[in-house]
Image (spheres, helix red, strand yellow):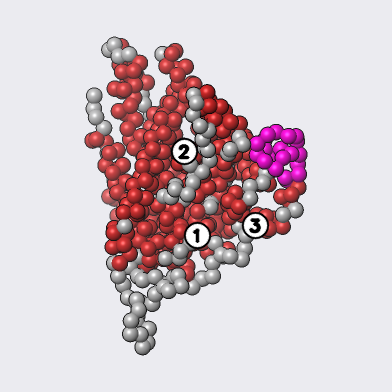
Amino acid sequence: MRRSNIWLWSAAALAYAFLYIPLIIVVVYSFNDSKLNAEWVGFTLSWYVALFNNQEMLIAARNSLIIAVSASFLATILGTMAGLAIHRYKLKFLPVLAFTPVAMPEILLGVALLLFFLQVLNLTLGMVSIIIAHTTFCIGFVAIIVRARLQGMDESIFEAARDLGASPWQTFRLITLPLIMPAVVAGALMSFTLSIDDFVITFFTKGVGEPILPIQIYTMIKVAVTPEVNAISTLLMLLTLTMIIIAAKLDSGILRREAK
Amino acid sequence: MPALFSMIKGDSKANRIAKWLVSGPPLLFLLVFFVAPSLIMLFTSLRFPGEFGGLAPIAAPAGAVHGEYGLTLETYQFFFSDILYAEIFLKSFAVAATSTLICLVMAYPLALLIARSEKRFRNLMVLLVVLPFASNFLIRIYAWMIILGPESVFSHFINTVLGVFGIAPVTLLFSSFAVLVGMVYVHLPFMVLPLYTNLEKHDPALLDAAQDLGANAWQRFWRVTWPLSLPGVFSGSALVFIPVLGMFAVPDILGGTGDILIGNLIKDQFLGTRDWPFGSTLSIMLTLAVLAITALAAWFARPAAIPKR
């Protein structure tokens, strides 16, 4: 038993190292006083200064933020509805529609939406098309989280509410919504991160006018790699880390309340 | 009892309205922005490309004597007539299979360790697997550009070791090797999570029983843990295999000129050569491949398929 444990531990340690070393390297080089990502020369913040003087990057960050907030707002509402409907009414069609965009390769949704926007809607690609595209794949994620929460709950609470004469709306507002709130918030945070993070679908549904963060990063990586990429990467990691800590805090707070 | 409840629910008009109020909006949104676009993609694959990109008209333009319009299966014929496309599909399948296998080998011990750790550490250990996954997708690929770059410590080390054996220095970046590393790195958590969820549910009493019956550590793993974990193995494999199959960003950034996969081919049809019908045909073929893989994984993971020992 002991020997197999040592094997397990070393294999797992290697896997964790594999997961973290690349990211640590990106962060470290963002403070390196050299244009090349090779030798450590000295500490500097100049890549961050350069980043904050890069007008296009700032606009891109603002655009991505607008997209992420709008898409996660829409996806949270529609996804919560979908999660509730799938759990409550045992629909056959809706789960397929909501979960397939999550499960299939992103490129397929990107291509399909590109053709749809240009051929059917005659839409000029831009912020609106990206928001719609992000909402489409985020709905499924929110629905999965909300449904999982509903599955873990005692159905008799809702029956009790109905027996006591609550209308469906009252049951939803006073019983269901407060109970599923942690899942709704988690779904919103997840949609926000997915939207900020998304490259593939954004790549297909973007317009030419507005710079978008992942596209800017892609161009920088493809055309001219400077440690500015490391700086923006580090800042983005900080942002998602904060989101995760908030989500974890929210979740554990709710767990404690349940335990009482 | 359930029948009785559904009868009461069905009788209430308010409930029926509520049902459509709740399911209507997401249903409508997904019909418009997911089902319709998918059908448009299918339809586009049956059309002729336009002269300057885009599409040729469906109806004959007024006064047209010749020219291409209407619907056709030409793009599908084209796909099957050129061996190049079959080769790219085969290569993509090979890359997906290899990435899946490497992910499985790396993820299994990790998932097993987490599942056998004390309960209070488990959530933290899972979080540590998911955390890097929350950093930007492009950044995770970019990190390997640094590590595998010609100036990096890692490249120098590898080439020094190769030099000792008298092997000429290799370029790690922009190669099939780099593509594989990137694919594994980006998708590893997809394999760990379903494996962990499965392994965590195993009853430790089974292993004790096996030990009492004289099974050694290897037998306990191979004849108890592994067969029980197969549903997790199959769902994890599907979660890695499918996105790798359609991935274009990893080969685009880490691969060389020869590392073209299905995703790159599709991307080029829309943003490079602008041949929409052929791009749609390729997307339809990819969809069929994904459906086949999903069906296969579901069939293998069905409870009856797991050997009882």
Horizontal and vertical percent position of residue B256: 49, 46
Horizontal and vertical percent position of residue A34: 72, 40
Mark 1 belongs to chain: A
State left or right for residue B42 relative to residue B309: right
Q: Earlier in the sequence, mark 1 or mark 3?
A: 3
- Amino acid type assigned to the residue bearing label 2 in the image: Phe
User: Please, what is the dominant secondary structure of the magenta stretch?
Assistant: loop
Q: Secondary structure at mark 1?
A: helix
Q: Residue at x 35, y 16 (%)?
A: B217
Q: Which residues are magenta?
A: A27-48
Q: Which mark is residue A204?
A: 1
Q: Which mark is residue B177?
A: 2
User: Does mark 2 fall on the same chain as mark 1?
Assistant: no
- Amino acid type assigned to the residue bearing label 1 in the image: Phe
Mark 3 belongs to chain: A
Q: Residue at x 37, y 83 (%)?
A: B61
Height in image: A39 above or below A188? above
